[in-house]
Image (cartoon, grey):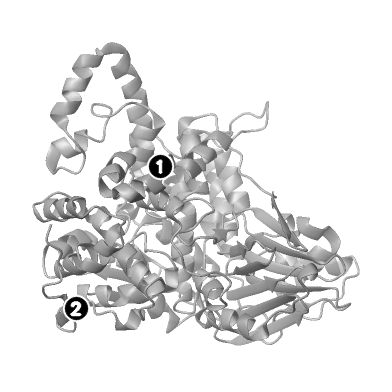
Amino acid sequence: MCGIVGLAIPDRLGRAVDQAALLRMRDALTHRGPDDAGVMVDGGVGLGHRRLSIVDVAHGHQPMTTEDGRSTLVYNGEIYNHPDLQRQLEAQGVHYRTHCDTESVLHLYERHGADFPRHCRGMFAIGLWDRATRTLTLARDRFGVKPLYYHHAADGTLSFASEIKALLAAGAVAPALDHASLPDFLANHATSGVTTLFQGVRRLPAGHTLTWRDGTIELRRYWDLSYRRPAGEPAPDDRAIVAEYGRRLEEAVRLRLMADVPLGAFLSGGIDSAAITAIMADLIDAPVRTFSVAFAEREANELQYARMVAERYRTDHHEILLSPGAFWKALPQLVYHEDEPLAHPSSVALHAVSELAAEHVKVVLTGEGSDETLAGYNRYRVTVANMALGGMWERVVPDGLRRRIANTIGEAGQPGVRGKLARTFLARRANLDAMYFDNFAVFDPGRQASLLTAAERETTRGIDPYAAFHAAHAASDAPSMLGRLLYVDAKTYLHELLMKQDQMSMAASIESRVPFLDHPLVEFVAGLPDRAKLRGMTTKWMLRQAMRDRLPAPILSRKKMGFPVPVGRWLRGEWRFLLDELVLGERARRRGLFEPAAVRRLVDGHLAGENHAERLWALLTFELWMRIFFDGEDPASIPMDRQSAPQFAGSAMLA
């Protein structure tokens, strides 16, 4: 796990790379690689690297150059089939100078050019300079486990980095809000496509390469996920499905044990992390080191389940209980680390357990990616049911009666039965936008219309907040509604979760690995019938069957908690003052983005018992983000408790 950066200036501009700027970029990512650093400048092209040493600790210095001096690479990630690749390449006469996977990537490029990622099994973000062809190639792994951002300037200059803050540190791009991305952020927890909230900063899409040559760029997709079985191939029976899935999952875990440093696992108490822990315990001679985090509140504490698994497999178990005070104190610094507003409060807990793990190991395995491949979220079965029942409802019940029933139910967000019914076909049209995108949005388009100021509505007029979702849905070859939903989330929602996983663990200088996203495993799962993933009310059916003799019964049968964080409760109590300052405050109002009266209604409604925790969290972390990246405030100096923030008193906006 490392941090990579680079600059490329077209030859026609006649400028060399400013090495001081390149070093600022590189060292903005010191937390990603505290063990080593390197830089390479070749006229108008420069590469920088920060290293967290995991494999071949003594010899993996980067940037790394081929023996003939033609190509130089910076690389973040792990190639898990590296031992096989090395054996194959050595059999073909390739001479290795090291035992690290970085060198394998260089040799793959020598043989396959820009197609080299097709041969890599793992997680990676790569920048590779070819002196002979004067091309810079960027590559990102199939699911986007490793982040990679870039800015392509009008004069053709390209800058790239593992984190946006490195682009800002070099002055490659000035911090400016991308208003066109604001509807996406407000609807979907985070920006879901290739754009970010920073104007001019884009993500390299997962499964893509970018080739830069003298100022021009070309993006090319090298991999996609198919949900269709080969024509004429019969669907396997249940027993064969479960056996093959178990074998492939074990292989994915085994490959991710490749390390020359201590490793462990995050253990939440859910089935995903429990399964990984169980498999690791069978593959490792010593006790598995496991790490758990929870809150004191009963509804946000899964420690009893994590302990159940830890005891079953006699792991070397460690826990941390995160207090509300520690949670809020950490928040500004973590907004800085994630570069954009924190989409999920669980990011704070993830960082806390990463810091705990960093005291013992350098690598952890996690359960990320299981839900989006095995239909683990409740919203999948809810949507499939709503679409089916809603179609019948609209055919049978007259329009006028449907409208009266919908008006009687009211809007989602209310407590009790009405609030739940408002999310069903009884109150919404049975189409994809209403049943899935709107239903699970933070601020759907209707709410955005009242939230945004008139000026901001005009600026964002005509922008589809679900554009990335619609594009993914149209691109999917899945034959079923469930398959299309899984594909959409794999292409959109999942990238935010992976960014959270990467940046919260890297902020603590540890590497996280995700076995459930081993691409041969995911390809196998995608081609299976829906019943292998969602069977009746049972989510992740295949995983539960594969682990039924290896995990305690309560782990197999319990409902998914999804790592809840009691933010809503906290903001009604002692921490309500944060709403006064960061959501209702004068500084937030002066930005001219959100209607003060609409924000006040959200706060008042939440305090009165409505559930607007997600919406208030989005506005609160957005304001922190603006203060850090646009106002230039040091995140460590932002007071998040009443005692150290006397200026908060009386700062609430009167609406």
Q: Which mark is residue 641?
A: 2
Q: Are marks 2 and 1 in contact (CB under 8 Å)?
A: no
Residue at 59%, 80% in the rendered image: 26
In the rendered image, is residue 566 in sight? no
Q: Residue 2 at x, y = what percent? A: 59, 76
The secondary element bearing badge 1 is classed as loop
Location of mark 1 (residue): 461
- Seen from the viewer's position, the closer of residues 290 and 117 is 117
- Seen from the viewer's position, the closer of residues 86 and 617 is 617
Q: Image quarter for residue 142?
A: bottom right
The secondary element bearing badge 2 is classed as loop
Specify few, some or many for label 1: CA neighbours under 10 Å numbering under 14, 14-19, or 20 or more: few
Q: What residue type is labelled 2?
A: Asp
The C terminus is located in which quarter? bottom left
The N terminus is located in which quarter? bottom right
Question: How far separated are the C-alphas under marks 2 and 1?
Answer: 38 Å
Q: Nearer the viewer, mark 2 or mark 1?
A: 1
Specify few, some or many for label 2: CA neighbours under 10 Å numbering under 14, 14-19, or 20 or more: some
Q: Residue 24 at x, y = what percent? A: 57, 83
Residue 243 higher or lower than 604, as above or below: above
Q: Residue 31 at x, y = what percent? A: 50, 81
Q: Residue 266 at x, y = what percent? A: 41, 68
Residue 39 higher or lower than 518, as above or below: below
- Left or right, 321 with respect to 23, comes to left
Residue at 68%, 26% in the rendered image: 232
- Seen from the viewer's position, the closer of residues 452 and 403 is 452
